[in-house]
Image (cartoon, rainbow, N blue to C red):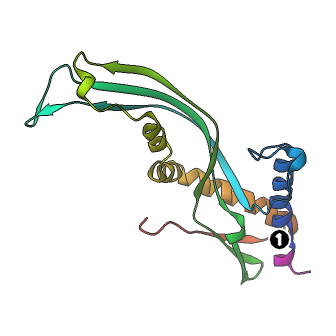
Amino acid sequence: MGVIKKITACIGAVVIGAAIVAVLYGAVSGIPAVLSSSSKSTEVSLLRLGITGIKSKENKSHFFNMEIPGTERAQFIQYSFDAKLGFDGKDVVIKTAGDNTYDITIPEFKFIGYDHPEYRTVVDQNGALSFGTPQIDTANMINEILSDKARSEYVEKNRDILEDQAESFYTSIVRSVSPDAKLNFIFKQAEGD
């Protein structure tokens, strides 16, 4: 069996093993562990972040571009969750570059998911004349916390760590099969980055 086939078999076994463990221990939300069917997930989670913050929103009524005093509404939401960042393992490409050297192309990093979300309104303030001011949409504020833009920002802020983790992950797998292998890593990025 060639070195690339051995490496691919090792990587496949690690990813499938992680998916099986996740299913057996009920890590897939909404599916009881006993009733789970086999999963074909190939996502590789490299980084888990504890995210906390406060999101605020204010609404005010205006009359001819002038703010009307006492009409303000304000809401502050404290949030926390554990974000998982990584990539889709099925899109990794390993090619022989000659002389026991391999090119490993890692796909675009992405926000894989999150666990343990908590949202709490810490301030909900309404001015004395706020009855005519539109209500603040709390659900929309929570959606903004996990918008596509916010998810992309979490990935970009942690790109260096993700690249280091991906290199470490694949280096340990490849070197378990071929200890003297030389590896070149190529990291794909989203269009426009």
Classify residue 175 by image quadrant: bottom right
In percent of width and height, residue 190 lies at 49, 66
Q: Is residue 57 above or below residue 103?
A: above
* Amino acid type assigned to the residue bearing label 1 in the image: Ile
Q: Residue furthest top?
A: 128
Q: Residue at x 24, y 27 (%)?
A: 132
In percent of width and height, residue 124 lies at 39, 21
Give the camera-side residue of 183 and 88.
88
Whether residue 64 sits left or right of residue 55 in the image: it is: left
Q: Which type of secondary structure does the marked residue at label 1 adopt?
A: helix
In percent of width and height, residue 39 lies at 81, 59
Give the camera-side residue of 78 and 35.
35
Magenta stretch bounds: 1-5
- Quadrant assignment for the N terminus: bottom right
Q: Residue furthest front?
A: 132
In percent of width and height, residue 83 lies at 61, 43
Q: Residue furthest left?
A: 64
Queried whether the magenta region covers residue 111, the answer comes back as: no
Q: Residues within 10 Å of mark 1 (few under 14, many from 20)?
A: some
Q: Is residue 162 above or below residue 90?
A: above
Q: Residue at x 67, y 58 (%)?
A: 166
Classify residue 29 by image quadrant: top right
Whether residue 60 sits left or right of residue 79 in the image: it is: left
Q: Residue at x 37, y 31 (%)?
A: 56
**Which residue is identified by label 1?**
7
Q: Main secondary structure of the magenta part?
A: helix
Q: Is residue 70 above or below residue 80?
A: above
- Quadrant assignment for the C terminus: bottom left
Q: Is residue 127 above or below residue 154?
A: above
